[in-house]
Amino acid sequence: MEVDVKRKRFSISSLTYKQQKILISITFLFVPVLLLILFTYVPSIFMFGYSFTDWDGISPTKNFIGLDNYKLIFSSADYFRPFIVSLYYIVAAFIQIALAVCISYLISFRCRFANLFKGVYFFPSLINSVAISFIFIFFFQPGSTLDTILKLLGLGRYIHFWLQDPHLINVSLAFVSVWRYIGYDIVMFSAAMQSIPTDIIEAAEVDGANRFQQFIHIIIPGISTILKLLVFLSVTGSLAAFEIPYIMTGGGNGSMTFVIQTVNFAFQNYRVGLASALAVILLIISILIFAIQRFALQSRGA
């Protein structure tokens, strides 16, 4: 009876401020952390375990084969050949970031209809990758939109088989990737630039700094945090390029990326163990890139 009375008297207001703060924090964090563990860390642990087996993805039997999958991968350069394709996406990612910074600078300060421009640039980021891929399949088809535009501009001699020529296919796909993601970068950089105090820029103008000097000495340092984040996301995203090349070419004509290769091993060749080992290697490479970036920036005092 006494216990029931105590239960009835319990309420959040009876806790101290510190206890209430801890309870609210745990309540809000519980569901996101649980979902993160269930859908990210647990599958990653299982994937790491599968990489030491010969599992085909269907059979209930998973035979432990030790490091054989890793030995097979590192015994042949063919498994790493898709990283050459990734270089196209990495170069495109740096071009994308450079363009996004410049465009953001132009529309963030004293630009009429700045929000309209941001909306126009961000719109491709709202379109599903499948839809974008189909749009550009028709765009690059022989005799279609791109070829027609080139003919109208008198540039017919530059018409090529954009998605059939092994020398051009990755350039075409990287261009689609830039078109797909540059709007997101522009919005992020614009938000970062808006946080720079205007009195600093006005003081620089009074001191005689031109727009280029303001851009180099005020804007770039002011957005360095978001710049570093987007560089990292762009590089790791380039290594994991999948949707656009898979839908547009299926990895054919020399457009095979590392992730497409991994998916093919898992779901076409039924070698989930080998595919898991490839995924683990890609994860380690991404972590190494992050570590190198952190080390390089810290050594420069950034």
Image (cartoon, rainbow, N blue to C red):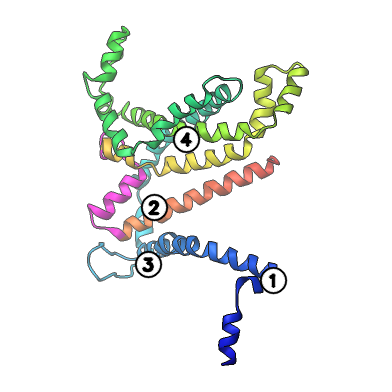
Q: Is residue 81 magenta?
A: no
Q: Which residue is mark 1?
A: 16
Distance, label 2 to label 1, CA atoms, is 58 Å
Q: Amino acid at mark 4?
A: Tyr
State which region is magenta. Answer: 250-272
148 to the left or right of 205:
left
Q: Which residue is mark 2?
A: 74
Of tags 3 and 1, which is closer to the observer? Answer: 1
Q: Secondary structure at mark 4?
A: helix
Q: Which residue is mark 4?
A: 184
> Which labelled disc corresponds to residue 152?
none
Q: Amino acid at mark 3?
A: Gly
Of tags 2 and 1, which is closer to the observer? Answer: 1
Q: Which residue is mark 3?
A: 66
Distance, label 2 to label 4, CA atoms, is 37 Å
Q: Position of residue 216 (x, y in %)?
A: 66, 25
Distance, label 3 to label 2, CA atoms, is 14 Å
Distance, label 1 to label 4, CA atoms, is 44 Å
Q: Is residue 256 magenta?
A: yes
Distance, label 3 to label 1, CA atoms, is 54 Å
Q: Position of residue 112 (x, y in %)?
A: 55, 19
Neighbour tally class for label 3: few under 14, some 14-19, many 20 plus, Cα within 10 Å: few
Q: How many marks?
A: 4
Near-viewer residue (148 or 62): 148
Near-viewer residue (106 or 96): 106
* Disc on the earlier residue, 3 or 2: 3
